[in-house]
Image: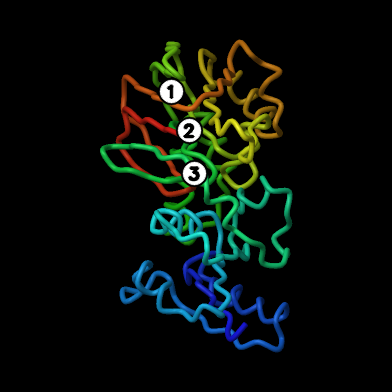
Amino acid sequence: MNNIIVLYNPLSHEGKGLEDARKLEKFYPDVACRYVDMTSADFAWADSLKAFDEDDMIILTGGDGTLNRAVNRLKGWDFSRQLYFYPSGTGNDFINDLNLKKTTAPFLLDPYLKHLPMAEINGELWVFVNGAGFGLDGYACVEHERKKAEGKQKSYIICALEGLLSKYKPVSGRITVDGETLSYQQIWLAPVMLGSYFGGGFKIASMQDRMEPEHTLTSVAVHDVGRLKACFLFVFAMKGFGHLFPKHITYRKGHVIEAEFDAPADMQVDGEVISGVTHYSAVLN
């Protein structure tokens, strides 16, 4: 190994991206680390990665948002060139799903990049690593970012609870999984999941296994329930016990998932927000 190339996001972990990335040096005290800002204008993924020496070790560091940014630019990644991941973000749903700790040493990312789903949202294509969430999930992400911009610290969970209690208005819609359509009223959440977690620790799809050989996604719908009872269900669903309430929380597994709603709402893809969504589709082959 000649050098360690560290691709970091300076905005991750509330602006501590470079500081977190430098913690890598404790794992490799005898090897020089070169830090590359993956958000800089002169960093072009395809050209930049090819420019590194074949003996260099490439480590991507950051959280779920950083990982999402990377996979959406690594389409067609050459798996003969290994890419490692060092988690250092805030929510870290990806490493929660792998049962790893934030302090874990860098690990090989390639096995988790080989079968990723593609979502079409508002005419734009997104690859995602954890999940794409419509409704209250998107609302909570928007509120979290708004509060952060105002200098206030409110977690995703708190923002979601505020939405449940008074601010978020559920919609009706239809979700089709592998050709079978079900209609719902009062849809609070309607994510499609590759992993188990979203929102920084919300275990919405406890049965989902990202590495299963069938390569399926899980569609989740929290629906047909009033505001107060939705708050009650939220607590159980957050801990992975949503399956105890099949009347109001529906889980379906499939390869092609399409959702259509009667009113627009916010949506998130691994924490990245898309506004004004009335339709999305997701495919995993």
Q: Which of marks 3 and 1 is in front?
A: 3
Residue 170 position in % (x across, y down): 43, 23
Classify residue 26 as left or right of residue 157: right
Q: Which residue is drawn at 53% across and 84% down?
A: 34
Q: Quadrant of residue 142?
A: top left
> Given the image, on which type of amino acid does mark 1 rest?
Pro
Residue sitting nearer the eye, 179 or 93 = 179
Q: Which residue is drawn at 73% across and 48% down?
A: 99
The residue sitting at 54% across, 21% down in the picture is 222
In depth, the one of 270 and 165 nearer the eye is 270
Name the secondary structure under disc 2.
helix
| Residue 116 image label | 3
Give, as a three-letter code, the residue at label 2.
Leu
- Looking at the picture, which amino acid does disc 3 mark? Leu
Is 265 drawn above or below residue 57 in the view shown? above
Q: Mark 2 points at which residue?
A: 136
Decide: marks 2, 1 in contact (CB < 8 A)? yes
Q: For numbered disc 1, what is the local secondary structure? A: loop
Left or right: residue 205 versus residue 10 is right
**Along the line of sight, the residue nearer the viewer: 20 or 73:** 73
Q: Which residue carries the number 1 mark? A: 170
Q: Do the residues labelled 3 and 2 touch (CB within 8 Å)?
A: no
User: Residue 66: horizontal and vertical position, in percent?
Assistant: 49, 60
Q: How crowded is mark 3: few (under 14 residues within 10 Å), some or many (20 or more)?
A: some
Above or below, comparing residue 134 to residue 17 in the picture: above
Q: Where is residue 280 in the image (x, y as percent from the top left)?
A: 36, 31
Picture disc at residue 210? none
Task: Report the colour scheme.
Answer: rainbow
Of discs 3 and 2, which sits in the foreground?
Answer: 3
